[in-house]
Image: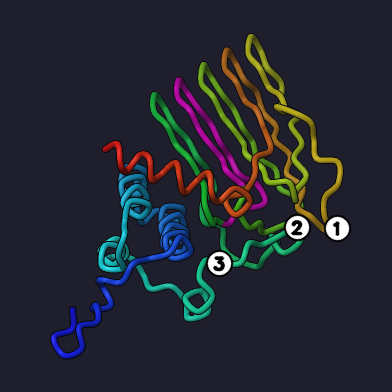
Amino acid sequence: MDEHNGSPQPGQLRISDTERDTVAATLREAFAEGRLDPAEHQDRLDAVYGAKTRGELAPLLADLPERSSVERAHGAPRPIHGAERVVEAEPTSRNALTVLSGAERTGRWVVPRKFSAASLFGAVTVDLREARFTARETTIQAHSLAGAVEVIAPDDIVLRVEGAGVMGGYWLDGDPVETVPAGAPIVTVTGISLMGSVWGLYKPRDHQKPERKRWWHRLRSRGA
């Protein structure tokens, strides 16, 4: 409390769900850029949704680059849509490879025209829901040997799965999206799955299911 007027200090102020989501978006971006490893990202995300005051959020961002003034002014970044996803930018990552472990590309990252994903007795997740693309048409070469590769797409891009399975599976899980915005990115997944699985599927984006996400993290935090 302020000794002069009894008002709380900035760090003692209670935070809103919007503030939690803003910090979570920053952490997802830092994870996609390789600034946080999977364990650090998950620990900080749990702390975000368990926080009650601004003072609890500050340490979670202290060692990360400051976000732009535009993003700070408007809270969480405005979700991009359809043709807006195609940008002139350097790719964030060109491949995701794993052997007896897991790997993922998720959050706000930039996908090159050709991206490679390969799993050898492991699992790879390529999440395109918040991704940008350097070209309208993108090819993901996805290969699996007794492992799994999952490609997650939002409902505003075209996802085609055209690979082959040899004693394994290669498929689109669920129905394709029938209507997408004009100029929307087209992503083709191709490759070979040998005694493994490669699949694509559509999932809602974070801003399309905020309440479920918030409550899940709160329950996890309380149960810790």
x 44%, y 37%: residue: 103
| Residue 120 x, y percent position in the rendering | 47, 23
According to the picture, the residue beneath numbered tag 1 turns out to be 182
Residue 71 in the image: above or below residue 91:
below
Left or right, 191 with respect to 48, comes to right
Q: Nearer the viewer, mark 3 or mark 1?
A: 3
Looking at the rendering, which quadrant does residue 134 occupy? bottom right
The amino acid type of the residue labelled 1 equals Ala
Left or right, 166 with respect to 102, comes to right
Q: CA distance from mark 2 to mark 3?
A: 16 Å
The outermost residue toward the bottom is 4
Asked whether 200 falls inside the magenta stretch, the response is no
x 43%, y 73%: residue: 67
Where is the C terminus found, in terms of image quarters?
top left
According to the picture, the residue beneath numbered tag 2 turns out to be 82
What number is the disc on residue 77? 3
| Mark 2 or mark 3, earlier in chain | 3
Residue 109 in the image: above or below residue 62:
above
- The answer to whether mark 3 and mark 1 are in CB contact below 8 A is no
- The answer to whether mark 2 and mark 1 are in CB contact below 8 A is yes
Q: CA distance from mark 3 to mark 1?
A: 22 Å
Which region is colored magenta? 110-128
Left or right, 10 with respect to 97, comes to left
| Mark 3 or mark 1, earlier in chain | 3
